[in-house]
Amino acid sequence: MTDAEWFESVKAGEDVGWKLVWERVVAPEAVSLRSAEMMKRYSLTGGDLMGLLYEEMIARGKIDLFRGEGSFEGWLKRYVRGYVLNANPNKHGVVSLENAHPDDEDGATGMDVPVQDKKVISKDIWITTHYCFHDLWMDDPEKAYVHILKTRFHLSSAEVKDFLEISSAGNVDQIFSRAVKFMRTAWLRHDP
Amino acid sequence: MRTPVDKTIVFTLYSHPMKDAKQRWKAHLTFAPGSTDNSEAVLDIADGEGTPIAAGGFEYAGTTIPVTAGRGALRCGDFVRGKHDGGIWLHRKGMPPVPGALTFE
């Protein structure tokens, strides 16, 4: 199904079109690094997102704002991400549909949510891992060397001990364990 | 120090983000199998546009090694002695020194 056919199908409220919305937009977003944790925190389900999207597109007629610039999938994802971000009760008090998209008709400033249709999850993970690894390097380069020798080159603790002149293989294990813990903590800092 | 006899270890080092691609750099530090203290790890270094660094100095943990035609050599013993030191810099004539760090690809 082309983007144009998909758009027409969604606009007509057809099951086949909305099934694709679930498969390509809502379900992947509900398990993405970007949204999953926030959805859990704000008690938001994939079904809620689907309902909000349907109400906005069909009942409010926002579907007509799609101008065919970029992919339809990406355009829908911006709405869905907006719902998740705006579900923060400390921000609005209630789940808000407003300000979810630059196409808002009331002139309010729209959110600038990046549009990434494919591989967004793996890209996020890749970038965040680089940030975390840089933090590890800044903490102690030796930890970064041990981490990379164990995880990328699959060296045994004895081999790492000989390579980096660490007192014992047990000590290598301890350094590696601290490095992994550091990466986990850094991950939470970079991807709250 | 002694590296595994059946593996070549290659560390990737990358400059901190710089606006100008000419100022950025990326280096590979290669340890041949079975390297020891007196062996030399080979450094291959290019700028952000992929052009090998014609001439310069690569500073690793206080030791500066000369770089010519994109290549230099670091004593393995010096590498291990600097394992706690994050001071990695590329010095080039007419350009400010650019720091870098270990990364992965």
Image: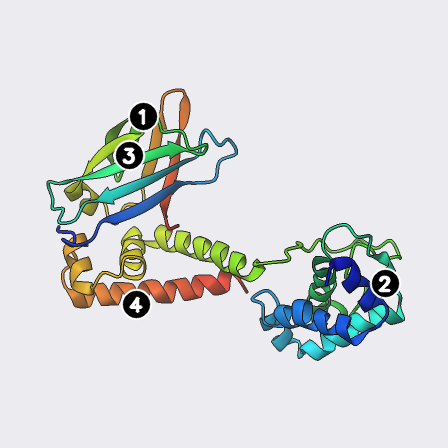
Colouring mode (rainbow / by chain / secondary structure / one colour): rainbow
A48 displayed left or right of B73: right
Residue bearing the label numbered 2: A62
Choose the circle earlier in sequence order: 2 or 4: 2
Count of labels shown? 4
Q: Are marks 2 and 4 on the same chain?
A: yes
Residue at (39, 50) in percent of width and height: B105
Which chain does the residue under circle 2 lie in?
A
- Amino acid type at mark 3: Glu
Subunit bearing disc 3: B
Query: Of the numbered discs in the image, which one, if any, rests on residue B24?
Result: none
What label sits on residue B56 in the rendered view?
Answer: 1
A135 left or right, relative to A36? left
Could you say whether the residue bearing mark 2 is in a helix, strand or loop? helix
| Residue denoted by label 4 | A177
Mark 4 residue type: Ser
Q: Quadrant of the N terminus of chain A?
A: bottom right
Q: Do labels 3 and 1 share a chain?
A: yes
* Marks 1/4 same chain: no
Q: Position of residue B17 (x, y in %)?
A: 47, 40
Three-letter code for the amino acid on which mark 1 is drawn: Gly
| Distance of label 3 from label 4 (alpha carbons) | 30 Å
When asked about the image quadrant of residue A49, the answer is bottom right
Badge 3, how many Cα within 10 Å: few under 14, some, many 20+?
A: some
> Marks 3 and 1, Cα distance to the nearest angstrom?
10 Å
Question: What is the secondary structure assignment of the residue under circle 4?
Answer: helix
**Label 3 sits on residue:** B59
Q: Is mark 3 on a helix, strand or loop?
A: strand
* Crowd class of label 1 (few under 14; some 14 to 19; many from 20; radius 10 Å): many
Query: CA–CA distance between discs 2 and 3?
Result: 58 Å
Q: Which amino acid does label 2 sit on?
A: Lys
Q: What is the C-alpha distance between the residues marked 2 and 4?
A: 51 Å
